[in-house]
Image (cartoon, grey):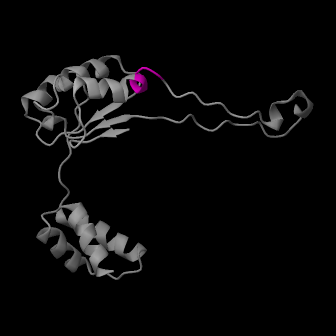
Amino acid sequence: LELNASDARSKKALTEALGDVTGSQVLRFEPAHPSDSKSNSNHKYKYKPPPPKRRCIIMDEVDGMGAGDRSGMAELLQMIKHSKVPIICICNDRSSQKVRSLAQYCLDLKFRRPTKTIIAKRAVEIGRMEGMRVEPNAAEAVAESCGNDIRQVLNCLQMWS
């Protein structure tokens, strides 16, 4: 489940959208497998149930939760404290006062923008998988001209194809 900056994230909207999700876990009912029955107890292989489905909530641009999201940040903090489901909060401005109040309740992971060399290597690989021949120096030039923005580099590759 994902809530972006374009979604209403007021206290009421968060409670309505996420209230049931944060307080419950996923239940999964599997059909009985033949090897579970007593008649097949000599069966060579044991039935392994599939791994349980997991879910999480993604709150994008939490540093952008502002006046239009009345009491949204306070409600988000309460949900983080009591949730049985992981809540991933993404921000652009780690130094924002709103984000600082969240930081004491979250695991803080910082990501750096990848270098043009790393982006170029990946662009060459993606191009190869898509049946394109992309020169490494051309991919580096594109990465640099796109400001090391992976999405823009992918858009360029798509236009070339």
Residue 66 figure quarter: top left
- Residue 29 spot, x, y in % from top left: 65, 30
Q: In which quarter of the image is the N terminus?
A: top left
Residue 123 figure quarter: bottom left
Residue 129 figure quarter: bottom left
Q: In this view, does 91 lie to the left or right of 97?
A: right
Q: Residue at x 24, y 73 (%)?
A: 156
- Residue 26 spot, x, y in % from top left: 52, 28
Q: Is residue 78 left or right of residue 113?
A: right
Q: Which of 100 and 109 is in front in this view?
A: 100
Is 112 contained in the magenta span? no
User: Which SS type dominates the magenta stretch?
Assistant: helix
Q: Which residue is drawn at 7% across and 34% down?
A: 95
Q: Residue at x 18, y 49 (%)?
A: 112
Q: Of all residues shown, which one is farthest toward the right?
A: 39
Q: Is residue 49 left or right of residue 51?
A: right
User: Looking at the image, is 118 positioned above or below residue 132?
Assistant: above
Is 22 contained in the magenta span? yes
Q: Quadrant of the C terminus?
A: bottom left
Per the rendered image, the range of residues in magenta is: 20-24
User: Looking at the image, is 83 positioned above or below residue 155?
Assistant: above
Q: Which residue is drawn at 22% across and 32% down?
A: 108
